[in-house]
Image (cartoon, grey):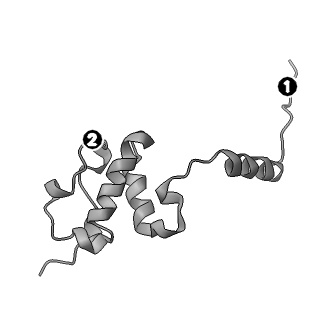
Amino acid sequence: MTATTATQTPPASLHTPVIGWFDQHARDLPWRRPEAGAWGVMVSEFMLQQTPVNRVLPVYEQWLARWPRPADSQHNRPARRSAPGAGSAIRGGPCACTAPPRP
């Protein structure tokens, strides 16, 4: 039995076509914009874990309007930080590391 070798395309040769496709077809999503910052990207990553983009978009905008920075959410109970309709992945709210240490 002889082994057949698949023709392999060098990874570097894929960069230009993939970047070209993305430039032409990428959706304009708020977390891809420069003003989103690290916080906006992290919030989107949590929300998009198990939820389609079309359901995340309105909740993402509401979330960042209410809590534009991690520190803004530290005094709210977790129930107030949940995002109804955005999937179970974000129910717990922001990372506990955003709260100051307790005395």
Q: Residue furthest bottom?
A: 103
Q: Residue furthest top?
A: 1
**Sequence-earlier tag: 2 or 1:** 1
Q: Which amino acid, mark 2?
A: Gly
Question: Where's residue 31, x and y in %?
Answer: 48, 58
The residue drawn where x is 84% and y is 42% is 9
Residue 91 % position (x, y): 24, 49
Question: What's the amino acid at mark 1?
Answer: Ala
Q: Which mark is residue 3?
A: 1
Tell me if 85 is positioned left or right of 50 in this view: left
Tell me what residue is drawn at x 41 percent, y 61 percent: 42
x then y, percent, for residue 53: 44, 43
- Mark 2 Cα shell of 10 Å, populated few (<14), some (14-19), many (≥20): few
Quadrant position of residue 100: bottom left
**Which numbered mark, 2 or 1, is in the foreground of this view?**
2
- The residue to which callout 2 is attached is 85
Q: Out of 51 and 101, give the one closest to the viewer.
A: 51
The answer to whether residue 6 is left or right of residue 55 is: right
Q: Quadrant of residue 81?
A: bottom left
Res. 91 in view = yes
- Tag of residue 89: none
Helix, strand, or loop for circle 1? loop
Q: Is residue 51 visible?
A: no
Residue 39: % across, % down: 40, 67
- Up-down: is 5 above or below 48? above
